[in-house]
Image: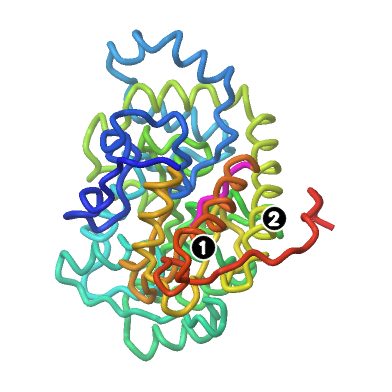
Amino acid sequence: MRHGINTAILRQGTAHSPSFFSVSRAMGNNTTDLADFCIPANPYFPTDEMFKHLESNLRTILKFYPSDVATIIGQLSGTLGLNPSTVSMANGSTELITWIDRLLVDTSIAVPVPTFGRWTDQSLETGKRVDMFLLREANKFELRIDEYIQFIRSRGSRVAVLCNPNNPDGGYIPRREVIRFMDELIDLDLVVIDESFIEFVEVERGASVAEEAALRPNVIVLKSLGKNFGLHGIRFGYQIANPALTKKISAALPKWNVNSLAEAFVFMLADHRAEYEESLKMLALDRFMMASQLSRFPELTVFPSQANFLLVKLPAGIEGGAFCDHLLSEHHLLVRNCGNKIGLSSRFLRFGVRPDTEVDRLVEGLRGVERMNDDASTHPLGAMELVSSPEPTRSFG
């Protein structure tokens, strides 16, 4: 058992889960055994070799200005096979969401919920009408394109957002359906397809609609490099749209909004594409194995996901905050409580997909909760038990 973390302090005044650095400070900077299931980042990329290269050049990277953003965009576009005139790069996808709202959302925006909170919060903060389309738990939070389009038409929404895969449930919409969605709404002011987690999709190759977006007058595709490349701390993302839309967004973005560390990494990518593709295969297998492990607890509901995280619902009567506090204070496991997401309650948790060794610790933490007290009614997880069943084999089968 581990003790000493004041989890109440970590929750004060925040609308999001505590950062790794906040937890680290609360732990006295002793994070050697902290497993982060909260932030969904690729655990297999960058490789150790890439980190060593960055470390050996860190003094130069931090000491000098980065290149102009056009140079960085040119390199990224060449590596990813994009037309640089269709790409804007920013200090994280959240910066792009901010400017999309300020420049291109005049009156109203339709957003499925639950989803990434900035899509509702940003426009609410600037006084726009946010039309929220509820994704139903009974349908496993599936977004049905025809129903969403009908909702948009009935509300008269002028901008529509679609996150694919969706955050926090990981639900995926087939590429052909996303293209149909864009074409059905060609008369809107703007359609945004948030593909922050598209690289993790396994059921369909070439899942992105970025190339199609660049051919349409009112579509933006949003990408977040931090998730799939495992570097949330750098804060860099990009958008793809037709050249006119891209120029409008690029003109509003602050100068020097991409730092030298991001530039150094972008220029490394071309030489490490094979390792990156392998990391995605490894993570897909981890997702399968982790879902299998969590599904062995019959009281938990584990929702299907094509992202690098799993949405899990706790049984009735279980308080998610107490559960997360226990895992953090006693097992040093940081977990995302989704109680502050519109359309969910604190019984919903999001687990970032992690390697086997860390998932074993999570399973042990779930088992340990039920041993906290002889009276099951006082446990954060009540009397939850692990079902004895064969261990899943490391195969997609």
Q: Can residue 179 be seen at all in this image of the molecule?
A: no
Q: Earlier in the sequence, mark 1 or mark 2?
A: 2
Looking at the picture, tell me which residue is in the foreground, 49 or 357: 357
Query: Is 259 placed left or right of 382 in the picture?
Result: left
Instruction: Please name the residue that numbered disc 1 is placed on.
Output: 370
Q: Residue at x 47, y 59 (%)?
A: 350
Amino acid on which disc 1 is placed: Glu
Name which quarter of the figure residue 321 lies in: bottom left
Mark whose residue sits in front, 1 or 2: 1
Looking at the picture, tell me which residue is in the foreground, 100 or 172: 172
Instruction: Please name the residue that numbered disc 2 is placed on.
Output: 288
Q: Can residue 251 be seen at all in this image of the molecule?
A: yes
Element marked by disc 2: helix
Q: Quadrant of the N terminus?
A: top left
The majority secondary structure of the magenta stretch comes to: loop
Q: Is residue 254 magenta?
A: no
Query: Is 292 placed left or right of 370 in the picture?
Result: right
Looking at the picture, tell me which residue is in the foreground, 151 or 358: 358
